[in-house]
């Protein structure tokens, strides 16, 4: 039986080193000591996530708690898992007070170090997502199985705790049992930035070039008449997008899983602002703003899983089932430059160049999909904001920006900016940041590192001012990205790749 104190110690060891090898070894050592029933909750805790998902606890509740710590560690992983489940089940009148009482009971059994860990866990401050790569390697090491098998099982299950349990319980055979399940979302494959269209084409060889739409990522599953729609972060939005459900239900197939983008168009067929598309994801009906889907991949069709097949075969399946809803694309290198210009003229972001021989793989692993834009943009994590001066007095203005650490550490600060913020954004972020606040000083409010903002910049330069050794040049806010989490943010490697000659 493993104590919460062991998880806290391991977490601190991981945070204290920059060595990916050391992080992996520390986590694998703890995973190897777990009892079977401890694997799922412990894996979630090690990844900085609440076992079972959110528990409805805000920072205001956590900040109001003042509990005397226990002198010695006694809490087991099972105790913590049960207590979190208990908090999650509290609802109805007076639920806020009852959650506070339940948390007080849990924290009263925790040492000072355990209390700090639990408060950061409930507050989302440990949930960085960037630890996923290290966790996958640690699970593979603890179970003595190939990393690729763990990675594939995680992509198909979408759940790290379930993947760890399978690996440690049954090794490669258990991992091999994971299949694409229609109705269960698959972690999406992502594109990494390319310096130019010519560079991407030269790197990938035989490729398809597609519009990069200024929309929101969707994954659509159909099994008979049952249709489900998911976002990039695997959140289900089926009830909010009935027009997409009806469209997919009308396709000539029995079952299908499609990957693509959706966006709202104006009367001239040009994309409406991204925020208008995203506003539909929280709605209960379509109202008057209709979404249009554009699919670029097919992961399953009529009982056959396609994720391991080359992209060219998946595109053949897509052309068969939804030809009229395919994203504009060309497989002709001679047409690539013209398609890029057409995408920009139509109001979109640029193009994505994809290796036609590549299988479907979650995350930015490898370089099989490369996105090309006319301007440099990065998806970065907001770490904090400073109070403004003059006209911006009373508003949180100057943003502290961090890049994802691919080795599982906290985001790495790469710059600040107050440019590009409209009055509307200033008002929104001032209220939102204080809801996400972890701590503050006289000038700065620090927030949980899970909010992603898209930044446009002229480039980067070497700088000793920030921990990553680089700094953004002329950075300005384009928009916030509620469709992305910290695991989807650009890494410090992506930032460094923008250095001159990088």
Image (cartoon, helix red, strand yellow):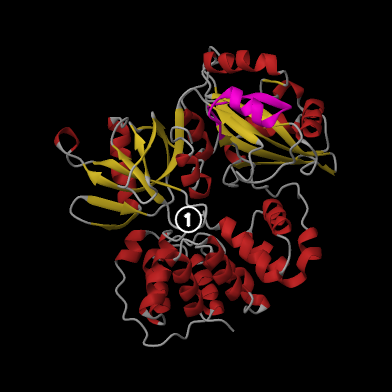
In this view of the protein, which residue sits in the foreground, 421 or 197?
A: 197
Magenta segment: does it hold 206? yes
Q: Position of residue 63 (x, y in %)?
A: 31, 64
Position of 138 relative to 382 (above/below): below
Horizontal side, residue 485 vs residue 253: left or right: left
Q: Is residue 242 visible?
A: no
Viewer-side residue, 26 vs 304: 26
Question: Residue 126 at x, y = what percent?
Answer: 45, 61
Q: Which residues are magenta?
A: 193-215
Q: Image point 57% across, 57% down: which residue?
A: 132
| Location of residue 27 in the rendering, given as x and y in whole percent from the top left corner | 56, 69
Neighbours of disc 1 within 10 Å: few (<14), some (14-19), many (20+): many
The answer to whether any part of residue 244 appears in the image is yes
Viewer-side residue, 219 vs 377? 377
Residue occupying image coordinates x 41% and y 76%: 114
On screen, residue 285 above or below 349? below
Identify the residue under disc 1. 128
Percent of width and height locating residue 405:
48, 52
Task: Point out the image quarter for the N terminus.
Answer: bottom right
Q: Choose top left, top right, bottom left or bottom right for residue 21.
A: bottom right
Say whether residue 4 is left or right of residue 33.
left
Q: Residue at x 44, y 50 (%)?
A: 450
Dot 1: what SS?
A: loop
């Amino acid at each position: 039986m493993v104590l919460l104190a062991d998880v806290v110690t391991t977490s601190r060891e991981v945070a204290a080193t920059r060595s990916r090898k050391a992080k992996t070894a520390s986590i694998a050592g703890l995973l190897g000591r777990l009892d079977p029933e401890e694997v799922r909750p412990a894996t979630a805790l090690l990844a900085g996530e609440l076992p079972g998902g959110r528990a409805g606890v805000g920072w205001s509740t956590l900040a109001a708690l003042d509990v005397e710590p226990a002198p010695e560690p006694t809490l087991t992983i099972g105790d913590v898992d049960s207590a979190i489940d208990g908090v999650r089940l509290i609802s109805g009148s007076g639920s806020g007070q009852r959650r506070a009482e339940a948390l007080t009971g849990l924290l009263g059994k925790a040492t000072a170090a355990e209390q700090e860990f639990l408060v950061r866990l409930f507050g989302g401050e440990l949930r960085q997502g960037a630890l996923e790569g290290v966790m996958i390697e640690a699970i593979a090491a603890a179970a003595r199985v190939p990393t690729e098998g763990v990675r594939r099982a995680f992509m198909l299950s979408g759940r790290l705790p379930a993947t760890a349990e399978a690996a440690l319980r049954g090794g490669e055979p258990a991992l091999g049992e994971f299949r694409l399940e229609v109705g269960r979302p698959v972690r999406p494959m992502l594109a990494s930035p390319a310096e130019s269209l010519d560079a991407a084409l030269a790197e990938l060889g035989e490729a398809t070039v597609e519009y990069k739409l200024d929309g929101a990522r969707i994954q659509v599953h159909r099994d008979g008449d049952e249709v489900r729609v998911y976002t990039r972060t695997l959140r289900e939005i089926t009830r909010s997008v009935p027009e997409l459900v009806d469209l997919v239900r009308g396709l000539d197939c029995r079952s299908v899983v499609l990957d693509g983008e959706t966006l709202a168009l104006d009367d001239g067929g040009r994309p409406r602002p991204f925020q208008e598309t995203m506003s539909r994801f929280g709605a209960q009906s379509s109202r008057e703003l209709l979404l249009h889907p554009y699919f670029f991949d097919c992961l399953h069709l009529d009982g056959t899983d396609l994720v391991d097949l080359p992209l060219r075969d998946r595109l053949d399946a897509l052309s068969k089932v939804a030809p009229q809803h395919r994203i504009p694309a060309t497989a002709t290198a001679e047409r690539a430059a013209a398609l890029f210009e057409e995408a920009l003229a139509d109001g979109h972001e640029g193009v994505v160049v994809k290796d036609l021989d590549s299988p479907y793989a979650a995350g930015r692993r490898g370089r099989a999909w490369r996105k090309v834009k006319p301007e440099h943009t990065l998806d970065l994590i907001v770490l904090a904001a400073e109070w403004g001066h003059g006209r911006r007095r009373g508003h949180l203005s100057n943003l502290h920006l961090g890049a994802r650490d691919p080795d599982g550490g906290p985001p790495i600060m790469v710059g600040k900016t107050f440019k590009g913020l409209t009055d509307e954004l200033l008002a929104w972020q001032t209220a939102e940041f204080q809801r996400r606040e972890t701590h503050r000083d006289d000038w700065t409010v620090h927030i949980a590192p899970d909010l992603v903002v898209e930044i446009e910049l002229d480039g980067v330069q070497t700088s000793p001012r920030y921990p990553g050794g680089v700094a953004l040049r002329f950075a300005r806010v384009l928009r916030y990205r509620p469709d992305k989490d910290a695991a989807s943010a650009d890494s410090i490697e992506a930032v460094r790749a923008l250095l001159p000659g990088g």
